[in-house]
Amino acid sequence: NAGVTQTPKFQVLKTGQSMTLQCAQDMNHNSMYWYRQDPGMGLRLIYYSASEGTTDKGEVPNGYNVSRLNKREFSLRLESAAPSQTSVYFCASGTVNGYTFGSGTRLTVV
Amino acid sequence: AQKITQTQPGMFVQEKEAVTLDCTYDTSDPSYGLFWYKQPSSGEMIFLIYQGSYDQQNATEGRYSLNFQKARKSANLVISASQLGDSAMYFCAMREGVRNFNKFYFGSGTKLNVKP
């Protein structure tokens, strides 16, 4: 099925550890996004990539880095995880008419 | 100022009744899009309905309709004949502008519980 695939679904990290969240879409969208979702705060944009080869900061970029590997793949990296980064992370791709989301990654930093 | 405001953190509705979820938005751009997404307990984000700022008629998708009141800057979601499977979190979102569609804002959500 066409869509957005992100891995892993669950992850527990210790403070200071690093990890990369992977995302791939097969809808030939130019734009891809990483959001985090925290209780009572909706979704907040971390980084986005308007097209292959470009990335830009969103609302809450501190502590994260991204790579747009090719048109299909957009990864999110936490270099030194902190408890404040405990959240649910969503990757999305989309057009002017809306987004398609991945199934989410539940990350806990202890 | 908040771009998207959802003032109902939680709501209850009786099965088979209609329910309205409120959403107000703030933009000075004449071209924008309004969206509703559903997030069930399983966590995925499901697109429900879209309304463009220049659309003359309210959008409808099955049991979902969007009550678009441009002058009041409101985009309420109406779910008719509620079902138990409608119990979920609902997010209103706005895409501001046309060219830069990376300006996409979400509200804080409304948790809907459908009672049997």
Image (cartoon, coloured by chain):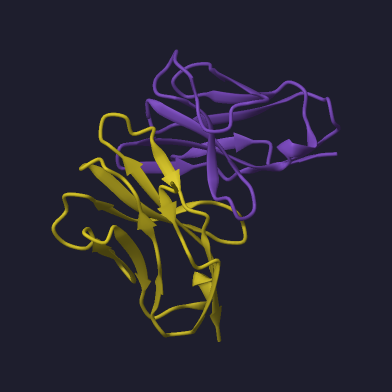
Chain colours: A purple, B yellow
Residue A54 in picture, x, y percent from top left: 44, 15
At horizontal 38% and vertical 35% (from top left) the residue drawn is B103
Q: Position of residue A108 (x, y in %)?
A: 77, 41
Name the foreground residue: B40 vs A41. A41
- The residue that appears at 40% across and 28% down in the rendered structure is A31
Residue in the foreground of this view, choosing between A67 and B71? B71
**Above or below — where is B83 with respect to B101?**
below
Number of on-image labels: 0
Q: Is residue B42 visible?
A: yes
Q: Please say if B54 is above or below B82.
A: above
In the drawing, does residue B56 fall left or right of residue A81? left
Left or right of residue B98: residue A59 = right
Which residue is at 16% across, 61% downward? B57
Q: Quick check: can you spot residue A106?
A: no
Q: Name the residue at the front extreme.
A: B1
Residue at the spot 64% in from the left edge and 26% down from the top edge? A62
The image quarter in which residue B16 lies: bottom left
Q: Quick one: A7 or B74, which is closer to the camera? A: B74
B78 relative to A59, above or below:
below
